[in-house]
Amino acid sequence: MGKIESVLRAEVVRLAKRQVRAACQPLGREVRALKRRVSELAKAVRAFEPVAKEAAAKRAEEAAVLQAEPAEVEKARMTGGLIKKLRARLGLSQADLGKLLGVTGAAVVFWEQGRSKPAPEKKVGLVALRKLGRRDVKRLLAAGQ
């Protein structure tokens, strides 16, 4: 009885392996084809990386310049309270606002307290910041660092 049992078991194992192999071979071919495709796509992406970096750097340079129309700057009121509200709306610290405008955080404190007024070129930056949102300002900060 033991011999028939072992022969049947061996035959079942052999047939099961054969069925598994038949089911897995097409999947294996697909996996290899997909791996080749992924490799080709990775090469294509690597070829475009320098172009993408160059474009991102160009966009960052263009965005890093805060500009406003002279007439708009002329009309703009820049009181300490308005500067503080602008900074709060943009979610900036005094030091961050100073970095964006090229001044120290202490200068921003003095502006907000009314002890001093921003220089004309800094006022241009403040007017330009009015048009930006939080995301834009965060991008500017990241580009400047």
Image (tube, grey):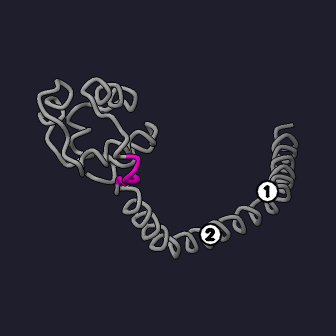
Q: Are marks 2 and 1 in contact (CB under 8 Å)?
A: no
Residue at the limit of the structure toward the bottom, as seen here = 47
Which quarter of the picture shows residue 87? top left
At a point 16% along the width and 29% down the height, the residue shown is: 109
Q: Which mark is residue 24?
A: 1
Query: Which residue has dot 2 on it?
Result: 41
Crowding around mark 1 (Cα neighbors within 10 Å: few <14, some 14 to 19, many 20+) is: few
At a point 34% along the width and 46% down the height, the residue shown is: 74
117 left or right of 53? left
Q: CA distance from mark 2 to mark 1?
A: 25 Å
Magenta residues, start to end: 66-72
Percent from the top left, x then y, of residue 138? 38, 42
Amino acid of disc 2 = Leu
26 left or right of 34? right
Which is nearer the eye, 54 or 13?
Answer: 54
From the image, which quarter does the N terminus lie in? top right
Which quarter of the picture shows residue 105? top left
25 left or right of 107? right
Disc 1 on helix, strand or loop?
Answer: helix
At a point 27% along the width and 44% down the height, the residue shown is: 123
Percent from the top left, x then y, of residue 52? 49, 68
Which quarter of the picture shows residue 80? top left
Which is nearer the eye, 27 or 40?
Answer: 40
Does the segment drawn in magenta span residue 26? no
